[in-house]
Image (cartoon, rainbow, N blue to C red):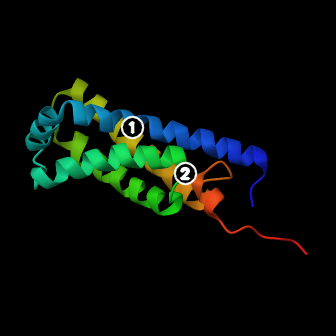
Amino acid sequence: MTRPVDSGVIFIARLALAVLFLWGGVMKLLGYSGFVGYLHTKGVPFVQIAAPIATAVEALGGLMLVLGLWTRPLALGMAAYTILSAVLGHDFWNVVDPTIQHDMVIHFWKNVCIAGGFLLLFVTGAGGISVDAARAPKRHLL
């Protein structure tokens, strides 16, 4: 059981995580062919499958975070997705230009930190301001 203040903080944390993914998903939709091309340059296998999955994960996952819907399983999936994105998209170990490599290192570790936030969300759950809380069976004290 969480205190009301805890639920508010968890809600803000969900929104903070969701912003990045909602924005990313919408940008992928608006520039879909560019996104597909980027995946090709990164050597991502099965791009025709990976691109729509990545777009859906970001857009729908972001929306589900805002709503607090199926938060615990979503948090695990988003943590895995974020680590996979770090490894495939921010592969600083393959970059020779020091300036670009520095930028890639920052983005790689940023993704690792975001995954850590998702793991915390997995532990805490969605909090009281969520669809998950509204759907939970109510306990009656007798």
Q: Is residue 47 left or right of residue 17?
A: left
Residue 49 visible somewhere in the drawing: yes
The reply, left or right, for residue 122 in relation to residue 107 is right
Marked residue nearer the N-terminal end (1 or 2)? 1
Q: Amino acid at mark 1?
A: Leu
Tell me the quadrant of the picture where the C terminus can be found: bottom right
Q: Residue at x 54, y 59 (%)?
A: 122
Element under disc 1: helix
Q: Pointer 1: what residue? A: 22
- Farthest residue in the top direction? 99
- Vertically, is 63 above or below 78? above
The answer to which of 113 and 138 lies nearer the viewer is 138
| 10 or 120, nearer to the observer | 10
Residue at which label 2 appears: 68
Quarter of the image with the N terminus is: bottom right
Q: Considering the numbered disc 2 on the image, is that residue within a helix, a strand or a loop?
A: loop
Name the one closer to the observer, 110 or 7: 7
Residue at image point 59% right, 61% down: 123
